[in-house]
Amino acid sequence: MQRLRFGPLVTVLALGAAILGAPFYLSIYWVIILTEILIMSLFAMSFNLLFGYTGLLSFGQAGFFGAGAYLAVLTLIHGPASLWVALLAGFLGAAVLALAIGWLCVRRDEIYFAILTLGFGMMLFTVAHNWRSVTGGSDGLGNFTLPELGVLGWNISVFNPKHFYFLVLFIVAVGVVVLFRVVHSPFGLLLKGTRENSMRVSFVGANVRSVRLFAFVTAGALAGLAGALFAFFNRIASPEMVHWAFSGKAVLMTILGGSGVFLGPAVGAGLFFVLEHYITAYTTNWLIILGAILVVLVLLFPKGVLGSVLEFRTRFRKGP
Amino acid sequence: MEGILANVLNGLSWGMLLFLISVGLTTVFGVMGVLNFAHGSLFMLGAYLCMQFVRWLGSFWLGLLLGPPLVATLAVVIERFLLRPLYGRDVSFQLLLTFGLMLFLDDGVRLIWGAAYHVVTPPEILAGVVPLFSQTYPVYRIFLVVLGPLVGAALWAFFAFTRWGKTLRAAAMDREMAEIIGVRVPVMFTAVFAFGAWLAALGGALAAPHQSVGPAMGEHIIIESFIVVVIGGMGSFPGAFVGALILGLLSSFGTTLLPDVQMALPYMLLALVLLTRPRGLFGEDV
């Protein structure tokens, strides 16, 4: 059985090395695609802390993603010219918003939670879309430049896609490690407990609302961090990043990869881009295919691609 | 004075359309426990089919008559083959399935009819304007304001007095008990889902001359009708009526009085209701 426990470690190390070394063997085009996949992975994994681990289906995760994007850009425009400060602003700003909105949303669960997060996410969208003097309205905020990144006394230009890739990789890795620690801590067990049976969790003395709120704020803050990176990546913060259709992307990626596996949403993000890349080459109606894929996944493969593959492997090893 | 009256009529006519879609949403939720994300898409499909029938047959009334049953037929297929396998599973998966259906239907409409906006003219008898104090007002909107309460009353009578309506309420209250005394719940679920879809499509067909028919109309109305049912109380029939009226009036008065924050008003109301009456205005305390 010892061999089985080494398997995942070796896989993760090999994958890590492949991702770390990507700029050295991939073309610039694919480095840029991979950068976007990494950012969306963090976004989808933040969503899955709520959905997969806490059992709360949020349709408003883009609210915090977009808030992070806008706050980071606003900091760059009006504040100090530092990417680190801007990232921190996106992270903390999204956390504060998630605290306020989460305080309202965790009062209800299941279907109500989905509607409430959708509603308040769209409230943030209307703010981004209508408050022209601050957010630039439907045009978004694009008139900013990315300052050089200060790392241990060096100043690095992030206009080189490879440099930017390493910045994204570093931030996403930090986010993923934080998520991993949360999920595998005693608190993570409490989260899964509230997913399975919230009444029992409250009987053993935990405050279900606080537990859910903490998960909501953590997810919101990490989504904000991903949003800040996404705004740097696109050189713009635009209202689409706050819209619920964008929340839907995190949902789709997570279901595609598998909500029950830690790295499922990241695999889903990768698959999402590959599918989009090939399908949009044939047809502009990519959403009709995406919708059909989601219906089939929900009906036949609710564990997602990674979840189903892992399950199949376990069954295969155990034998019939 | 005229301004206020025009606002009231605008609010009521929009509220009536919201009511037609919300009442289907809330009935489906009340009986089946399913929140249908694709409900707005069915509304939109109703509008497009009505437009298509007007083009083919030249009659708005035929569009109103023929479009909604087609959408209801589609709903039967959806319920029977896609939703039914999911009843035993986590409610999240039902929500996700209808979310996928929404993407599918919205993009399907775009594929068939294109991304452009279309205009449906109201039938002759309802076209034109009537004088209202010193200004004029479209007849069609007044028609909607009158029609809404009539549909509401008919639905209420159906639920209160007919055998079918009573059976439905019984099944919503206690599914198992209803099954034990011989109600064929699976058939009823299909019927309720189709009925909700028919109402949504009827709302869409009625909305076609009221607003422009375009691929974004489903997405716009589904969010507002979600807010209506949460404010009114999920599964509550009077809640859907009152919630729809409030949101309709909020929209018309907000546009004239508070244009800057008008779009955010429904969400503020949502937060307020949630803090003071978490089960909604007409929701029962559990």
Image: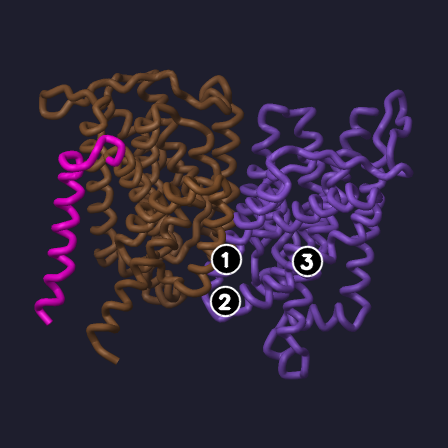
In the image, what residue occupies the spot 67% across and 56% down?
A: B197
Q: Colour of chain B?
A: purple
Q: Residue at x 82, y 46 (%)?
A: B57
In the picture, the disc for residue B86 is: 2
* Magenta stretch, main secondary structure class: helix
Q: What is the C-alpha distance between the residues marked 3 and 2?
A: 19 Å
Is B105 above or below relative to A30? below
Sequence-first tag of 3 and 1: 1
Query: Whole-percent x and y of residue A229?
Result: 30, 31
**Residue A220 position within the rendered picture, expressed as x and y whole percent measured from the top left:** 36, 41
**Residue A136 picture location, percent across and down:** 47, 20
Is residue A19 on the magenta stretch?
yes
Circle 3: residue type? Gly
For the residue labelled by badge 2, is the local secondary structure a helix, a strand or a loop?
helix
Rate crowding at label 1 as few (under 14), some (14 to 19) or many (20 or more) other CA atoms within 10 Å: many
- Magenta segment range? A1-30
